[in-house]
Amino acid sequence: MIPLFDSESLPPSQEPLEEGAVLLRGFATSETPVLLEEVNRIAQVSPFRHLVTPGGYTMSVAMTSCGRVGWVSDRTGYRYDPADPDTGAPWPAMPGAFLDLAARAATEAGFPNYDPDACLINRYAAGAKLGLHQDRDEKDAWAPIVSVSLGLPAVFLWGGKRRSDPLRRLRVENGDVAVWGGPARFVYHGVAPLKDGLHPLTGAVRINLTFRKVF
Ligand code: MD3
Ligand code: FE
């Protein structure tokens, strides 16, 4: 098979980003077809939707969740909710393949015994982006966020502890896993607007899984 994106054919490698943060390139490449099947099953129960921010903007990224709680936003604020507000039902359970991958990646990054409560699933079409933010609604301020990239490549914008800190740009692609915890947990980050493209597994989109220890 001829890889569409060069680094998908490279062996896995570890790239330290800063203390508490590491990019595990290719860590999940062999698992991505199974992960995407699970995403599709989840989305049949809790469909992707464009959430509205408290400020009244509709997000360009479409989202769903699985696990004990899901991340939601509306005009009243954002929160983790045990029910999907669109269906009224609990979120789909976290698949075993998700938990297993997240725990292995966290261990590799120096965070053993990782047991996330939630996985937020983000879907990016061409032009979709995620503005600079911190993830700070989770109780455990040391436990990492584990991010798994699926499908089209993207550019992470990754700054420092202050919003005004300079940004680095980090290209990530199908099968790359990033882990941010401990001293790197409250780093400002975002995703640059997705470039058009076609990926054999996802077509015209990028999917990102972010695992969180919420409680
Ligand atoms: C966490 N999603 O859902 S994490 C999010 O590609 C989110 O959809 C990104 O940020 C996405 O909240 C993937 C990227 C990231 C980068 C730097 C971080 C997460 C980080 C630094 C500290 C903590
Ligand atoms: Fe985030």
Image (cartoon, rainbow, N blue to C red):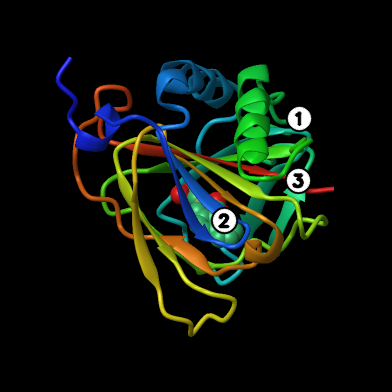
Between disc 2 and disc 1, the foreground one is 2
Q: Secondary structure at mark 1?
A: loop
Residue situated in front as seen by the camera: 26 or 122: 26
Residue at point 46% right, 57% down?
A: 59
Instruction: Give the labeled residue for mark 3.
Output: 213
Mark 2–mark 3 Cα distance, whole angstroms, equals 16 Å
Residue 215 or 2: which is nearer the viewer?
2
Please name the residue shown 41% across and 17% down the image.
Answer: 33
Q: Is residue 146 above or below residue 90?
A: below
Q: Give the distance between the C-alpha atoms of the residues marked 2 and 1, in whole angstroms.
A: 32 Å
Label 2: state its secondary structure.
Answer: strand
Looking at the image, is mark 1 or mark 3 nearer the viewer?
A: 3
Q: Secondary structure at mark 3?
A: loop
Tell me: 112 left or right of 179: right
Give the mark, 2 or 1, whose residue is nearer the N terminus: 2
Residue drawn at x 40%, y 64% is 157
Residue 21: mark in rendering: 2
Q: Is mark 2 within 8 Å of ligand 1?
A: yes
Q: Position of residue 125 (x, y in %)?
A: 32, 44
The amino acid type, in three-letter code, at marker 2 is Ala
Q: Quadrant of residue 99?
A: top right
Identify the residue under disc 1. Answer: 90
- Mark 2 Cα shell of 10 Å, populated few (<14), some (14-19), many (≥20): many
The answer to whether the residue labelled 2 contacts the one labelled 1, judged by CB atoms less than 8 Å apart, is no
Q: Amino acid at mark 3?
A: Lys
Question: Is residue 71 at all visible to an observer of this figure?
Answer: yes
Q: Earlier in the sequence, mark 1 or mark 3?
A: 1
Quarter of the image containing the N terminus?
top left
Estimate the x, y position of residue 65 in percent, counting from the top left: 62, 37
Q: Is residue 52 visible?
A: no
Marks 2 and 3, the one that precedes in the sequence: 2
Counting other residues with Cα less than 10 Å from the Cα at mark 3, is it few (<14), some (14-19), or many (20 or more)? Answer: many
